[in-house]
Amino acid sequence: MTGRPPRIDGKLRVSIHTNNGYRYACTQPWTIDPKSGKKQYRKVYWGQVDENLTFFPNTRYIYASEEERVNLDFPDEWDLSEISKIAGTMKGRPSYQGEDVNRFYGDIWLLEQIAEKTGIKKDLLSVFDGNVEMVNDVLTLAMFPYLTGFTYNRVARWQKIAKSPSKRELTPSAITLLSQSISEEHRMKLLRLRSARLRKHELCAVDSTSRSAYGHSLTDIRWGKNKESLPLEQTVEVVVYTLESHMPVYYRTFPGNMQDSRSLETILADLDYAGFEDVILVTDRGYEKIRNLEAYILKGQAMIMCTKVQQRIVNEKIIGYGDFSSRPEGMTIDKDSKLYYQQFAIDYPVEGSGGATKHSEKLRLNIYFDSVRRSEELIRLEIDITDQREGLERLLIEGQPLEDDQSLKRHYGYFKLDYDAGARILRSFELNE
């Protein structure tokens, strides 16, 4: 192999390359083709050079690291004064004596103070055995998407114009190595430390949301079929957070096609293993299933669970109220929320795995009634019935053929229709009581 030998100092010589009448400051790093064994050169442009040999840097040079800049060997006769002038006009990079960085970091400073006050940084130091560099890397990755909304492939670029907790360049490969070094043991240790900061009988809400995923390697993505039958896979992101301080204490992903009620058993097992024994879970109707209620009772887990009115226990109580005018008999008004409510003690026996029966001694059913909302819904119902009646009267007068049965049910669902099945002409209609 022949050619110019590489420089001992490892620097790259900058020369002028003319293209379409423009003069560019160019370096030509090379690599060895593994198949042919020959050198392969590529041109890297760092800016433009005028006839007076004044160098005007481009964005590649402005955003290059200090190591990359030092590695460039400019000819002695070139004028490099424009570097400091242009760097001072770039957003987030004020011109001053020293390395160009962003000195305005109020948003990052605020998040650093939150990490200190809430004990997150102290807990992370305990998890990673006092490794300050690793903790700062994790905090940087936690702050970056919240502050920028970008993905992690832009972290290294962002660090060149912003002050972050991490002092090293977090390239995609460095982020991959960092994430691979975090084990399940680290995760559970952090959860145990966070649980130790909660008060006894702390109220913790359980909530989830679906998120589209573009990868294919993770199991939750491969099995997470889209609920809307779209070709894009989904995952379910579950978080448990305290209602008073709004601090997240638990996080996990599930396949997108997994219902909330099915994931609750796994959430309870994780929380128990992490040490969340005295918290009170608050769930919405998505987690309401009889088997989950029985699991709560057998485990002795305190909970506040929203339920559907179609549930047998609830439906029986509502039917027991019968007809009423302003409010159901037996309900009490809450002056703050302006809602009527009534509480019932429920005896719900559950048979355990050994055949023993456990009774729910403290199970209570709270039923709430909003008279204002009921009045609004009755008004809306009256308006819909009036609109449908007027539409049917026009069809009777005009004698136009009716739509298909499915459309009739959708547009005139409050009425019983009598019509000629062949000609589909309306004969009469009456309110479906």
Image (spheres, rainbow, N blue to C red):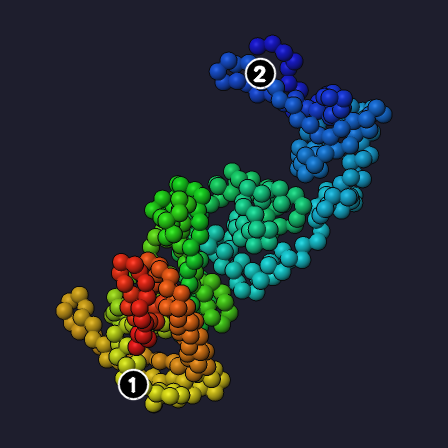
Residue that mark 1 sits on: 322
Residue that mark 2 sits on: 39
Residue 373, percent from left and from top: 44, 78
Task: Say above or below: 27 vs 333.
Answer: above
Q: Residue furthest top?
A: 2
Asked if the residues shown at circle 1 and circle 2 are in contact, with their CB atoms under 8 angstroms apart, the answer is no
Q: Nearer the viewer, residue 212 or 356?
A: 212
Of the image marks 1 and 2, the number of the one nearer the N terminus: 2
> Based on the displayed image, in which of its 4 quarters is residue 78 positioned?
top right
Q: Secondary structure at mark 2?
A: strand
> Based on the displayed image, in which of its 4 quarters is residue 13 positioned?
top right
In this rendering, does residue 280 appear at all?
no
Q: Secondary structure at mark 1?
A: loop
Task: Give the residue type at disc 1.
Answer: Gly
Q: Nearer the viewer, residue 7 or 257?
A: 257
Residue placed at 54% from the left, 46% from the top? 151
Quadrant containing the C terminus in the rendered view = bottom left
What is the spatial separation of the Cα atoms under label 1 and label 2, in whole angstroms?
Answer: 89 Å
Residue 3, percent from left and from top: 63, 11
Q: Nearer the viewer, residue 397 or 194?
A: 397
Residue 248, percent from left and from top: 47, 62
Task: Say above or below: 432 vs 214.
Answer: below
Binning the other alpha carbons within 10 Å of mark 2 as few (below 14), some (14 to 19) or many (20 upward) gives some
In this rendering, does residue 119 appear at all?
yes
